[in-house]
Amino acid sequence: MASKEHGGGAPRDDGSDDNCGCGSWTIALLLFTSFWLVMLYLPPMDSLPGIREIDGSPPWVDDKPTTCSVELADVRGLEPALAPGATSPAFDLVVHVDNGHARELRHGGGDVVVSYAGVPLARGRTPSLRLGAKCTGRWQVNVTGSGLGIPADLSRLMTAERRWGVAQLEIDMGLAWQSFTCDVFVDGQPGASACRLE
Ligand SMILES: *[C@@H]1O[C@H](CO)[C@@H](O)[C@H](O)[C@H]1NC(C)=O
């Protein structure tokens, strides 16, 4: 107990103070206890925001791939380049994504290219997305081309195809580390067109 009373100035030369050993055991015990307390009271992964389960099924079952589909909300600028008032081709898309995975999906966005008859007309980006396990979401993706209208030959083909109601745009997009292709009718169709993996 002498070491405690004038421990302030006296240099410790024997190194055999048992208070010291006792203190480190207390600290070790405290660290150990707090570690387990933290592990015990951490929220489970599923309850974190943005992560959700459906039907309460455990997250390790029912893992399905990510799928997506595209709706064409509006289209402009498909007249021939030389037509009066021609504008840049513009496509307003709604991209639906279904995260089939039993884990959260996060992706920084990818390229979107809209083509007709193999000719790229507009290019843009999908927004970065964050989708909980087994959740679906939809994003507006509006892409605009750079030129005015579309080439005359392409316009003639499109006019003919639209008359028959068969004109389709091809939409290629990078999403969730995969490349998808979707065919969308220019003159609309009910609902969204499913995309396939490229
Ligand atoms: C995208 O297109 C939709 C549908 O035409 C429109 O409502 C929306 O305002 C557009 N968004 C932007 C950022 O231009």
Image (tube, helix red, strand yellow):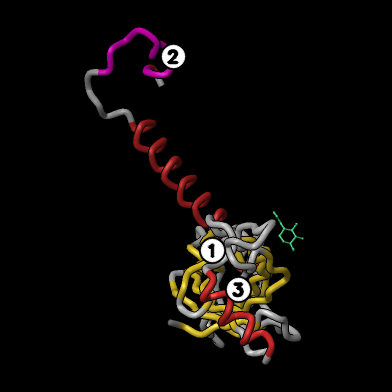
Q: Earlier in the sequence, mark 2 or mark 1?
A: 2
Q: Is residue 2 magenta?
A: no
* Nearer to me, 68 or 28: 68
| Quadrant in which the N terminus is drawn | top left
Q: Is mark 2 within 8 Å of ligand 1?
A: no
Q: To which residue does mark 1 refer? A: 122
Question: Disc 3 and disc 1: Cα gap in Å?
Answer: 32 Å
Q: To which residue does mark 2 refer? A: 5
**On the image, which quarter does residue 75 sit in?**
bottom right
Question: Disc 3 and disc 2: Cα gap in Å?
Answer: 62 Å
Q: Position of residue 43 (x, y in %)?
A: 63, 61
Question: Amino acid type of disc 1?
Answer: Ala
Frontmost of labels 2 and 1 is: 1
Q: Earlier in the sequence, mark 3 or mark 1?
A: 1
Query: Which residue reaches farthest bottom?
Result: 164
> Residue at point 55% right, 81% down?
182
Q: Position of residue 29 (x, y in %)?
A: 45, 48
Question: Amino acid type of disc 3?
Answer: Ala
Which span is picked out in magenta? 3-12
Residue 133 disc label: 3
Question: Amino acid type of disc 2?
Answer: Glu
- Asked if residue 171 is positioned above or below residue 86 in the image, the reply reads below
Q: Position of residue 28 (x, y in %)?
A: 41, 45
